[in-house]
Amino acid sequence: MFSLFMRYSLDDSFVEVDLKKNCRGRQRFISKSLMQMLWPDGKMIPQAKLNDIKSLMHLIPRDAQAFYKKLTGDNSIEDDVDGISGEPDFEIEVEVDRDPIS
């Protein structure tokens, strides 16, 4: 149940990789009912992103459209990089044009 089969090339045979966490003692099962939802009413997204999604709605399969139709947007929200607002945990590189116009 907690494994996958992979291979490094098409010529190799499949190898089973165990994904179950190794721990001593009894394993603890955490049910969804014990977890607290981060955004129970949904997380708002930037309005510009919502507008882009709405413009692409004709490309989204019908069975998935209900999810996207429930999204809400707000103009005051900035698009964050990591999905949870706050400082990014990496350096943002800015490309500088080194070819000055004469």
Image (cartoon, rainbow, N blue to C red):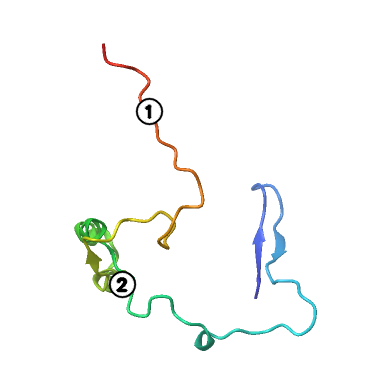
In the rendered view, does 89 fall on the left or right side of 79?
right
Q: Is residue 25 above or below residue 75?
A: below
Q: Quadrant of the N terminus?
A: bottom right
- Along the line of sight, which residue is nearer the eye, 16 or 27? 27
In the rendered view, does 33 fall on the left or right side of 54?
right
Which residue of the protein is positioned furthest toward the right in this rendering? 24
Look at 44% across and 79% down and name the residue there.
37
Does dot 2 land on a helix, a strand or a loop?
A: helix
Q: Measured from the top left, where is residue 102 in percent x and y?
A: 26, 11
Look at 38% across and 20% down and name the residue there.
98
Q: Is residue 33 above or below residue 7?
A: below
Query: Which of the two discs, 1 and 2, labels the residue nearer the N terminus?
Result: 2
Mark number, residue 96:
1
In the rendered view, does 40 fall on the left or right side of 66?
right
Look at 24% across and 71% down and name the residue there.
69
Q: Measured from the top left, where is residue 59 in percent x and y?
A: 26, 58
Q: Which residue, given by chain and number where applicable, does mark 2 sit on?
A: 67
- Along the line of sight, which residue is nearer the eye, 88 or 30? 88
Mark number, residue 36:
none
| Amino acid type at mark 1 | Val
The label nearer to you, 1 versus 2, is: 1
Instruction: Report the Cα–Cα distance between label 1 and label 2.
Output: 39 Å
Which residue of the protein is positioned furthest toward the bottom in this rendering? 33
Quarter of the figure with residue 78: bottom left
Q: Measured from the top left, where is residue 40 in percent x and y?
A: 37, 80
- Along the line of sight, which residue is nearer the eye, 87 or 47? 87
| Amino acid type at mark 2 | Phe
Does dot 1 land on a helix, a strand or a loop?
A: loop
- Along the line of sight, which residue is nearer the eye, 102 or 35? 102
